[in-house]
């Protein structure tokens, strides 16, 4: 997957998260979780885009690490919503799958970037 495809994928993920959060119940407890999920989901895309524009390898790794952390947060929030029964069905399952795949991709990308940095000594 190239950078443009990954940008499109993280953008779609953030839009899917926003749409999902809008459909959650409006009680204060759920809204609190939805806000954190929304922030993490949109941050994945924003930080991946920033990584692609990074002026240095160090900044690239930093932004990629943030995107990874936020994707992992999405995995956690989606799991909690599912376990406590606030959301179920295909929409949350698809988001859980995509969040997990993004974690794997971003983790592998960061590992590659760190390895290359360490080989080159900067």
Image: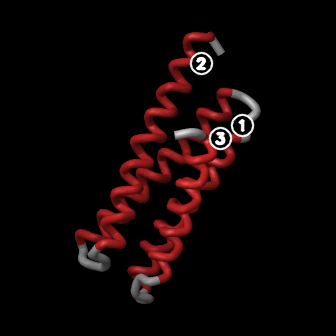
* CA neighbours of label 2 inside 10 A, class few (<14), some (14 to 19), many (20+): some
114 shown above or below 95: above
Residue nearest the viewer, comparing 53 with 68: 53
* CA neighbours of label 1 inside 10 A, class few (<14), some (14 to 19), many (20+): some
Count of numbered circles on the image: 3
Residue nearest the viewer, comparing 107 with 26: 107
Percent from the top left, x then y, of residue 113?
55, 26
Q: Secondary structure at mark 3?
A: helix
Residue 51 image label = 3
Asked if marks 3 and 1 touch (Cβ < 8 Å), the reply is yes
Judging by the rendered image, the residue that carries numbered circle 2 is 117
Q: Is residue 84 left or right of residue 13?
A: left
- Please report the residue visible at 48 percent of the width from the left and 68 percent of the height from the top: 17
Residue 114 image label = none
* CA neighbours of label 3 inside 10 A, class few (<14), some (14 to 19), many (20+): many
Task: Answer with the quarter of the image where residue 15 lies.
Answer: bottom right
73 shown above or below 87: above
Percent from the top left, x then y, of residue 89?
27, 75
**Label whose residue precedes the other's in the sequence (1 or 2):** 1
Quarter of the image containing the C terminus? top right
Judging by the rendered image, the residue that carries numbered circle 1 is 54
Mark pair 3, 1: CA separation = 5 Å
Q: Seen from this angle, which residue lies furthest bottom?
A: 26
């Amino acid at each position: 997957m190239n950078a443009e495809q990954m940008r499109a994928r993280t953008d779609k993920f953030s839009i899917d998260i926003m749409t999902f959060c809008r459909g959650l119940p409006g009680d204060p407890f759920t809204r609190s979780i939805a806000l954190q999920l929304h922030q993490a989901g949109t941050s994945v895309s924003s930080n991946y885009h920033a990584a692609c524009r990074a002026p240095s390898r160090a900044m690239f790794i930093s932004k990629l690490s943030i995107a990874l952390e936020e994707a992992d947060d999405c995995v956690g929030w989606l799991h909690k919503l599912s376990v406590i029964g606030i959301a179920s069905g295909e929409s949350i399952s698809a988001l859980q799958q995509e969040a997990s795949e993004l974690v794997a991709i971003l983790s592998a990308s960061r590992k590659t970037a760190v390895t290359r940095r360490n080989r080159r000594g900067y």
